[in-house]
Amino acid sequence: MRIEEFNALSDADVATALRACVGIDSWVNALASGRPYADTDQLLDAGRAQAVGWAPAEVEAALADHPRIGERAAPDSATAAHSQREQAGVDPADAGLAERLRDGNARYEERFDRIYLVRAKGRTGSEMLALLEERLENDPATELAVTRHQLGEIALLRLADLLETEPAEATS
């Protein structure tokens, strides 16, 4: 959709579109109330600025709508279509990789008490597994910051997809 179409959406429709990018109400409300945007870059910049300030509780709540790496989202999930495209780098026929991802996901959840989240778009299953292994070495505070950053990257990529553009850079 073009930025003019985004700006013209009803409040309910823009909230639905933004919530499919990330389920964080403060982000959805800030971007919705910031309309109209002059161009897509202005909207993406606003999204990036909002993502940096996400509280730990917001990040934790947003993870509920994300499937584990190597799994598929529930079909009725707000983000199911996004997740399926983003995880295209995970070959479902690679049983060995699937087992290693299941094991890594379980170890991650045991250590951090939440799902492992990584920007999957453009990454192979092996790359995501390697990142999982690296992140298992993080302390809880560092890992929460990494998770927030990854969630921000995902949200911006989804927002860019909504507007059919590419974000200039990831969140900080």
Image (cartoon, grey):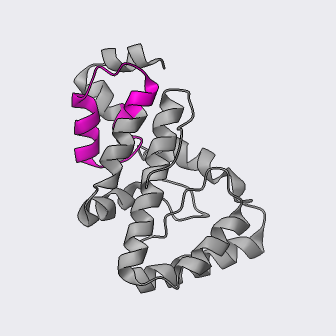
Q: Is residue 120 above or below residue 102?
A: above
Residue closest to the eye, 42 or 104: 42
In x, y percent, where is residue 19? Answer: 34, 41
Q: What segment is highlighted magenta in the picture? A: 17-43
Q: Residue at x 42, y 35 (%)?
A: 44
Residue 160 in the image: x percent, y percent? 50, 34
Across and down, in percent, residue 125 comes to 70, 64
Tell me the residue at 34%/50% (across/down): 51
Whether residue 66 is visible, yes or no, is no
Quick one: 99 or 133, which is closer to the camera?
133
Q: Image check: 1 left or right of 112?
A: right
Q: Is residue 15 visible?
A: yes
> Residue visible at 60% across and 81% down?
103
* Viewer-proximal residue among 105 and 32: 32
Q: Is residue 147 left or right of residue 50?
A: right
Quarter residue 17 falls in:
top left
In this rendering, is residue 36 above or below 79? above
- Quarter of the rendering containing residue 32: top left
Quick check: is 99 in the magenta stretch? no
- Give the residue displayed 63% in from the left and 54% down from the top: 87
Above or below residue 85? Residue 111 is below
- Is 127 situated left or right of 110 in this image? right
Question: Relative to 130, is 57 on the left or the right?
Answer: left
Where is residue 10, by image quadrant?
Answer: top left
Q: Nearer the viewer, residue 13 or 8?
A: 8
**Image location of residue 83, percent across then percent down:** 54, 49
Quarter of the picture holding the C terminus: bottom left
**Number of marks in the rendered image:** 0
